Amino acid sequence: MRAHASIALLLVALTVAVYFPVHAFDFVNYDDFDCVVENPNLRAGLSLESVAHPFTHALGTNWFPLNLISLQLDHALHGIEPGGYHVTNLVLHVLAALALFAALTRMTGAVWRSGLVAAVFAVHPLHVESVAWISERKDVLSGLFWMLTLVAYARYAERPGAVRMVLVASMLALGLMAKPMLVTLPFALLLLDYWPLGRLSEEGDPGALSPARVRAAVLEKWPLFALIAVSSAITLVVQREGGAMAFGEHLSLGIRLANGLESYVAYLAASFWPVGLAVFYPHPESISWLAAAGAGVALLAISAGAFLLRRSAPYAAVGWLWFLGTLVPMIGWIQVGMQSRADRYTYIPQVGLALAVVWGGHALLERARAGRAVGGALAAAGIAGLAVAASAQVAYWQDTVTLFTRAAEVTERNYIAHLNLGKAFVERGRLDEAEGHFEEALRIRPGWTEAQLGLADVLVGRGRVAEALDRYAAAAARSPDSAEASGKYGLALLRVGRFDEAAPLLERALAENPGAAQLHTGLALAAGALGDPAGAIRHNREALRLTPDHAAAANNLAWLLATCPDASLRDPVESIRLARASLAAGDARSPGGLDTLAAGLAADGRYEEAARTAEEAAALAEGAGRRALAQGIRSRAALYRAGRPYIETPAR
């Protein structure tokens, strides 16, 4: 037991040492904003309704309710501070490594070898993506339930029974609700039945399969196969309806098969020499059929070798088949997404390789009569090397620019990297750099709508709205189903006062993305300008519900509730509260914010206080060179001094 505790402590210390920097990392502009920052279900807070919502609604192209509930818990604890989410990912990864160690130790009795496999799992650079990327919470969460399923199955194998199988099935069900990747787990359990559990062999001949025992092992797992059938059906429906397979529809079956073979070899190579790792690997322009054939021959050769060693070294066959089999759902033969492969897909499959290598290395050292000191030194050196490489890889995840700069450096024609760098530089106001990256993305992928929208964003940033409108219009015409194109075009039209054209575009975008607070604020502005104050109030309220600290929405709603010509829609008390909240969330000396507060005070009959506040706002506007605003505020101050509120149409 002392060895168990020592190894467990070493695993925790080593993993935390490698990943500790993530606590200070930011969100990255690659799913993190959709999954966390702008996810309305997270902002709704913890309630029965919000917890039930992920079970009946997909997020984008994924149905993973347990994953979303874990993010809800993080949001309740940390809001939108990224450090807390990163730490949760790290904790889940540590627990998964400990559960893997416990399961292997119980199945094999080999404490140190089990600990070494768990250490490889804990610090391999290929797994950094799963841990350091907040949106990949589904990997570490489902990975934990995979390992807990192994622990439960080790107990079941010792003494089979219905109650213990229910526990195994429960762990699998929870894992599937975190990520459907666990559909291969029952097959992995059959491999473990062969080795190390020895549940499939003839009595007295560990290498010979017993047909009766194989049938029994398959039949006892019927609840597990039923679960993966249901999960697979849900996944296929959600991903097809969400458009996740659309990119794959442009790739022939031959190309997908060839890419899958090459990806197997790439994963295998990176497992032993993890260099040049990237967050996104684009599909090559063309497939080398010779390279694909070579990859296929290599895989067949290794498989043949593992088969020949099935009696003398059953761990080699089990480890290799684990690697091959658990990668099948992610290998790209059924294409989901635009990537050719992804490091995160090795999170579970690589355990098989580690099993084969660690047990094979141990056997070789025993055959060579090397002492424990030699084996220990080699193991320590290997883990240290992986830990150093993983630490370097972790550093690339600190923010969007660092992450995608690295991806562009180590891959060719990476249009996703250039697109996301362009977006990141727009947010930072570095428009020249942003423009260069959007143009490079278009050079690689001509006519790409998202890159065209990025160039239009650059034009808006430079104040060239008329030119931007032409680009937005062209992008929206080219991709009429793109909610992003419709939304950006609509918001740009608002800037030039074309409210009647903007409204239907914003409505179309909102239908696809109902949680976008910016679209609601845009529609509120359009509704007010088009004579629909009730609609303006409704959309501003929804924007505030989605983003409670949205200062602009609070200010706009406060103005409407104070100055609306329809007296039944006015609410001076709420107007004052919202105006003060807006000032607190934004600039406490904002002339516009103070002007709104003054209007609310006047609507509540507090004219003297309203006049003082308006005069302060006018002075601040004058000092900022905003003479027209200052003049308008002073005219309202005169009304307040005369004991009259200011009433106008909702347009602001």
Image (spheres, grey):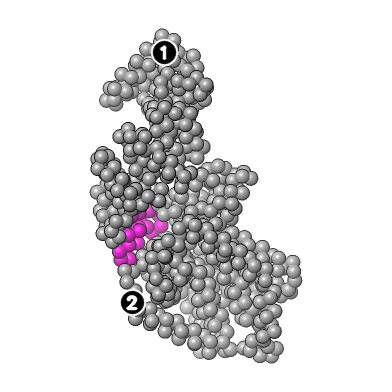
- Residue 480 image position (x, y, % from top left): 37, 50
Say if the magenta span includes residue 451.
Answer: no
Q: Is mark 2 on a helix, strand or loop?
A: loop
Classify mark 1: residues with Cα within 10 Å, few (<14), some (14-19) or many (20+).
many
Residue 248 visible within the image: yes
Give the foreground label among 2 and 1: 2
Q: Earlier in the sequence, mark 2 or mark 1?
A: 2
Q: Which residue type does callout 1 highlight?
A: Tyr
In the image, the segment drawn in magenta is: 396-420
Q: Which residue type does callout 2 highlight?
A: Ser
Q: Name the residue under label 1.
A: 640
- In the picture, measured across the screen, residue 385 lies left or right of residue 415, that is right
Residue depicted at x 37% and y 12%: 638
Name above or below for residue 247 compared with residue 399: below
Residue depicted at x 56% and y 51%: 57
- Residue 254 image position (x, y, % from top left): 40, 75
- Residue 624 image position (x, y, % from top left): 29, 26
The Cα atoms of the two marked residues, 2 and 1, are separated by 77 Å
The numbered dot on residue 288 is 2
User: What's the magenta bit mostly, secondary-structure-wise?
Assistant: helix
Quarter of the rendering occupied by the C terminus: top left
- Residue 207 image position (x, y, % from top left): 62, 88
